[in-house]
Amino acid sequence: MKSFTYERPGTPAEAAAAVSRTPNAKFIAGGTNLLDLMKLQIETPTHLVDVNGLGLDTIEPTPEGGLRVGALVRNTDLAADARVRRDYAVLSRALLAGASGQLRNKATTAGNLLQRTRCPYFYDTAQACNKRQPGSGCSALDGVSRQLAVIGASETCIATHPGDMAVAMRVLDATVETIDAKGTARAIPIAAFHRLAGDRPEVDTTLKPGELITAVTLPKPLGGAHIYRKVRDRASYAYALVSVAAVVQADGSGRVAFGGVAHKPWRVEAAEAEMTRGAKAVTARAFDGAKPTRDNAYKLKLAERTLGAALTEARA
Amino acid sequence: MAGTAACAAMTAMPGTSRAENAGTDQPVLARVSFTMNGQRRDLELDTRTSLLDAAREHLHLTGSKKGCDHGQCGACTMIVDGRRINACLTLAVMHQGAEITTIEGLGQPENLHPMQAAFIKHDGYQCGYCTPGQICSGVAVLAEIKAGIPSHVTADLNAPMQVTDAEIRERMSGNICRCGAYSNIVEAMTEVAGNLTTRGPA
Ligand SMILES: Cc1cc2nc3c(=O)[nH]c(=O)nc-3n(C[C@H](O)[C@H](O)[C@H](O)COP(=O)(O)OP(=O)(O)OC[C@H]3O[C@@H](n4cnc5c(N)ncnc54)[C@H](O)[C@@H]3O)c2cc1C
Ligand code: SF4
Ligand code: FES
Ligand code: FES
């Protein structure tokens, strides 16, 4: 790890200003992704701005009847919040399907959204990777790609957003609230928060440098059955190969987003018109134009079957 | 109070601790004070020092183990402000004022914690390397169930939590045991959970 200076400001505006003012600075929240990457020198910040003292750790009701989740709310606390369990169960379920108890106790709402890909070549500094080192090439294209994206990928990167929480937030149409160094606040719909890799795979999100996430807001509850199904190589403590976040109403209509298939949580609103016709009809539209590799073509069938299981669960 | 003063010192830290070393292999130093196993500790550390290395290398509390150093095995599990975390994936300097318990603080050979005693009784280990992390995690898991925190296998998110084998296995999945002592660990935890219910809240 390269050495770094460290500071712990007291307000969001100071934190945003500190990162903007200092070259090569980064925020640190739970540290469970950033420190992992710093140990491998995949991330090499020379200044860390600790955001744990900013008072952004509460969950409050909004005037619209939703919830405003502070950026520093721990994954455990968000999953266990009685209002979230009752009204946004898909979010509780997604959080509980991720990582381990120890990690969820540290991991934060903002840090979880910003976790980086788990592409094995991104982690192996001896290999070419456009996301880690722009312009160096993509080892995954001709390499082992069974975990990687089947849709929305580019010529330069076929990585996935690996997380679970963001998939549930996408199905709930959450909004990411931020503040920049000048103190200007911004609200980014979750659909526009994570990017497709395109020709800038090194940029995961539409967050600007130095922009601080202050909260994520959830709109008023949708009702319906909330399902999160995650398929992985072992029953616990593993990333998704494919996951499905679904909110299904009594008449069979609803919403669905997929994890583990693209550079962002994958939701195609037009495909949701097919919800009453079943999983095959929905996935045919949601994955229209998919370009899987030989290694990961199985994910298309898996997505259909996982959604099928979710719809069965919703009817039960 | 002392905590406030130390905080101020930390904020001023970039100016006082060789900020010019940032980005090199040379250390940048910072001060931190926390309580570990009931004892107040004041340290001046390289900012890169993990909480695990602070305990093992600086405070010579070598009970907590380093298995992977990447949050993947749970051997480094400590209880910080009442919650279990992976001490390898957090910086010591981020724990100003924290109350930390390691395996050494849970119990001593002559005065074992009930979870330590149950691990011995049920053979909850073989080589013992993962054991300090398993025991710290086990103690915290029972507290989490008591506090009503749900898990991935909890069938009804809105009903009271139960201590079942499935719950214990899921909640302990962040602690890997290469010797495969898992089923004995489940037995040890089940016994402690049973004792807790009959004895009432501690
Ligand atoms: C072994 C292991 C298994 C895992 N398994 C899963 C899994 O199955 N599913 C899953 O979803 N996740 C999994 N994770 C990932 C885990 O969820 C993330 O590491 C965690 O959510 C990151 O949160 P953090 O607060 O620790 O972020 P940090 O590491 O502190 O930060 C991550 C990034 O976010 C930035 N950041 C943090 N806060 C802010 C803010 N307020 N504003 C702007 N930028 C900010 C940081 O600068 C950094 O770039 C796993 C992790 C490990 C180590
Ligand atoms: S898929 Fe993306 S992250 Fe993986 S090697 Fe290629 S460029 Fe890097
Ligand atoms: S040493 Fe910390 S999780 Fe493995
Ligand atoms: S007892 Fe040997 S690793 Fe668990």
Image: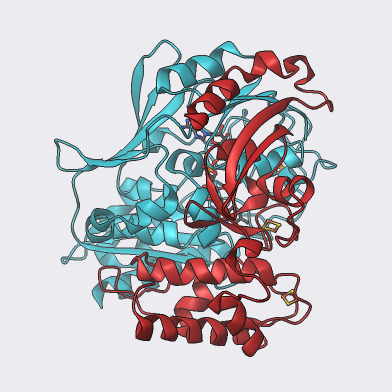
Chain colours: A cyan, B red
Residue extending farthest front: B110
B69 relative position to B113: left or right: right
- In the displayed structure, B91 sits above or below A199; it is below
- In the displayed structure, B3 sits above or below B72; it is above
x and y percentages locating residue A64 in the rendered image? 14, 37
Pick whichever, A124 or B199, lies toward us. Answer: B199
Q: Quadrant of the C terminus of chain A?
A: bottom left
Which picture quadrant has residue B199? bottom left
Can you see residue A233?
no
The residue shown at (61%, 69%) is B107
Pick whichever, B118 or A177, lies toward us. Answer: B118
x and y percentages locating residue B44 in the rendered image? 71, 32
Count of numbered labels shown in the rendering:
0
The residue shown at (34%, 58%) is A80
Pick whichever, A122 or A104, lies toward us. Answer: A104
Ligand 2 picture quarter: top right
Which picture quadrant has residue B50? top right
A80 relative position to A113: left or right: left
x and y percentages locating residue B67 in the rendered image? 75, 61
Can you see residue B80?
yes
Q: Quadrant of the N terminus of chain A?
A: top right
